[in-house]
């Protein structure tokens, strides 16, 4: 089995996915990469937002928001 970088062999599933990806047209590959990048960016943004401290309003002021 071929190696992926320094000493990391590809699993059978990775080989199958790589072959599938390489068999796609260039346009399909780009569309798939764009979708993956968008999903990754969204996940990273959500991680940043989730790590922020949330300021909470006192219960008396929360009623005014609804």
Image (spheres, grey):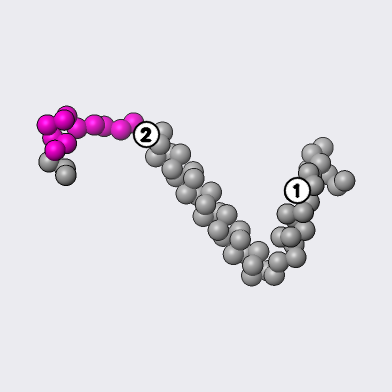
Whether residue 27 sits left or right of residue 14 in the image: it is left
Residue found at x 16% / y 36%:
62
Where 58 sits versus 4, above or below? above
Q: Quadrant of the C terminus?
A: top left
Whether residue 12 sits left or right of residue 25 in the image: it is right
Residue found at x 75% / y 65%:
23
Q: Secondary structure at mark 1?
A: helix
- Point out residue 32 in the picture as x, y percentages from the top left corner: 61, 61
Q: Residues within 10 Å of mark 2 (few under 14, many from 20)?
A: few
Q: Secondary structure at mark 2?
A: loop
Is any part of residue 58 visible from this angle? Answer: yes
Q: Is residue 47 magenta?
A: no
Residue 35, by quadrant, is: bottom right
- Point out residue 65 in the picture as x, y percentages from the top left corner: 16, 43
Q: Which mark is residue 30?
A: none
Label 1, on which residue? Answer: 13
Q: How many marks?
A: 2
- Point out residue 53 in the picture as x, y percentages from the top left corner: 34, 31
Where 35 sits versus 56, above or below? below
Q: Which mark is residue 52?
A: 2
Residue found at x 78% / y 44%:
11
Whether residue 35 sits left or right of residue 18 in the image: it is left
Is any part of residue 4 visible from this angle? Answer: no
CB-based contact (under 8 Å), mark 2 and mark 1: no
Q: Residues within 10 Å of mark 1 (few under 14, many from 20)?
A: few
Q: CA distance from mark 2 to mark 1?
A: 37 Å
- Point out residue 1 in the picture as x, y percentages from the top left corner: 87, 46
Earlier sequence position, callout 2 versus callout 1? 1
Specify the segment rendered in magenta: 53-63
Residue found at x 64% / y 70%:
27
């Amino acid at each position: 089995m071929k190696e992926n970088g320094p000493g990391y062999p590809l699993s059978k599933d990775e080989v199958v996915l790589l072959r599938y990806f390489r068999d796609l047209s260039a346009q399909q590959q780009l569309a798939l990469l764009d979708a993956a990048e968008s999903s990754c960016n969204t996940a990273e943004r959500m991680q940043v937002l989730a790590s922020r401290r949330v300021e909470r309003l006192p219960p008396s002021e929360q009623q005014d928001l609804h």
